[in-house]
Image: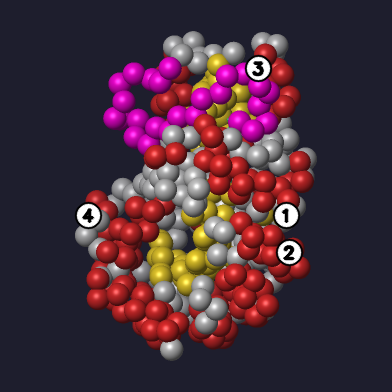
Amino acid sequence: MKLGLIAMSATRAHNKELTELGFTLPGFVDRSRVIASLPSLGLLTLAGMTPNDIDVEYIDIPDLTAIDDLPAEFDAVAISSFTAQIREAYELADRYRASGTIVLMGGLHITALPGEALEHADSIVIGEGEPSWPALITDLKNKNLQRVYDSRDRPFDLADSPVPRYELLNQDLYNRLTVQTARGCPFSCEFCAASIRLCPQYRVKPVDRVIAEIRHIKSQQPEPFIEFADDNTFVNKRHGKALMQAIAKENIRWFTETDISVAEDDELLSLMHDAGCAQVLIGFESASREGLAGIETKSDWKAKQFDKYMSSIDRIQSHGITVNGCFVLGMDNQGPDCFEEVRKFVEDSNLYDVQITIMTAFPGTPLYDRLLREDRIIKPDAWELSTLFDVNYHPLHMSNEYLEGRFRWLVEQLYSEKFTNMRHQGFHQRQAA
Ligand code: B12
């Protein structure tokens, strides 16, 4: 039996002016170029759980319009899903089904909207892939596929993680590879559309499993740069330190997403530095305290961190680890000044990199449900606009045009050559001092 694993990677944005502008700005282009070629870790992971008697091939189709003939002859294809590419994924699924190939779908978007997905797939997995994959494969072989496999009541124990089959990739196409060391996040931000939507529990992968994955990558790429595909790596500081001590022996450079609490632990920061951490991405979300109110729905945790923002950036960067600060624009507690607030915050702080996005209501999030109730979603099923750079809702304290226009202004300010160089040089000068 031949199984095709089909990812539809690459980045997406519909706002034409913003896209054109982005491609001329150094600070923006650099990061886009780096991330655009990451493969689907979800599919590579499922490949690692697929029995050897199934012939597995990994294919990335970043742009469906660019291909006429579908790749290879497969008995079945497994297609992953993010919201922004779901129309293309459904088109691909329809084309495969029309040619007699069995279509399996799973991932974040399918989990949010299983009913919609069933119109295009023979079989879907809701939630994490691993708990359902062995049964699905058995049923596929026995020609007894169920329409729906639901993993949500069976959180996957990451101690049972298979090593993702990185060897299926054409290594020339990928300048970075991903490893997941943890899944979920203890916080519950209203807009979050990441892995807590697959399974709400926060779990860490045992250190030896992570190291096995890193070593497998090293067998494919001798000096890899790894992105940890975690939502929040260092929630459990004790585990984080053990992980760092083990990674330090692997001689790799890496990047991850975490929260600001790492700044409170100098020992952890030293270990991260020694283990090859190049950058941490942290969701600051807003450059004013008022703007943060209500974002984290359990205990308003994000709002409580605001006073520590500047000192935490300095503390982390003093260990030689750069901080990429993320800000969301157009949130309900942000006024028309939020754009200038972010510009000023970035200027006043020593942030090395910055990432700005427009508030996006992904399906399956509490934010989407609330905005829909409030009749503020402009086109309720325009999933292609779920890019983090397009406006598909009515902001509370500004018009849509104002949000779009000022966002473009902020992009121009933050990613100009001058400002980007200033931030980077400032970091290197402080390191040298
Ligand atoms: C790496 C990454 C990328 C990479 C690689 C994407 C890829 N091909 O997988 C790149 C850089 C290309 C990328 C691009 C984008 N990304 Co991105 N990305 C991530 C990141 C950091 C990690 C994802 C990951 O690897 N998770 C780990 C794997 C193991 O999980 P998984 O893919 O969900 O797979 C599991 C299940 O979903 C399931 N599963 C998945 N597929 C299938 C298929 C079948 C058949 C089955 C049975 C099961 C199954 O099984 C897997 C194991 O449990 C997350 C944020 C985060 N911290 O998680 C954002 C994230 C996924 N990205 C996001 C967004 C918005 C984008 C972009 C739209 C940005 C843009 N404007 O271009 C594009 C869209 C790309 C697209 N094709 O649609 C959002 C998606 C939200 C959503 N619900 O859609 C996230 C959550 C970040 C956020 N800000 O909220 N991204």
Question: Quadrant location of the C terminus?
Answer: bottom left
Secondary structure type for disc 2 = helix
Q: Nearer the viewer, mark 4 or mark 3?
A: 3
Percent of width and height locating residue 386: 43, 49
Q: CA distance from mark 1 to mark 3?
A: 30 Å
Residue occupied by mark 3: 53
Q: Is residue 403 above or below residue 6?
A: below
Q: Is residue 96 left or right of residue 304?
A: left
Secondary structure type for disc 1 = helix
Whether the residues at callouts 2 and 1 have beta carbons within 8 Å, the answer is yes
> Label 4 is placed on what type of residue?
Glu
State yes or no: residue 61 in magenta.
yes
Q: CA distance from mark 2 to mark 1?
A: 7 Å
Count all numbered tags in the image, as a single digit: 4
Q: Nearer the viewer, residue 64 or 192?
A: 64
Specify the quadrant of the image occupied by residue 171. top left
> Label 2 is placed on what type of residue?
Ala
Residue occupied by mark 1: 207
Q: Is residue 409 left or right of residue 388?
A: left
Specify the quadrant of the image occupied by residue 165. top right
Who comes first in sequence, dot 4 or dot 3?
Answer: 4
Percent of width and height locating residue 100: 49, 10
Residue occupied by mark 4: 20
Residue 242, numbered circle: 2
Secondary structure type for disc 3 = loop
Q: Nearer the viewer, mark 4 or mark 1?
A: 1
10 Å crowding of disc 3: few (<14), some (14-19), many (20+): few
The span shown in magenta is 46-72
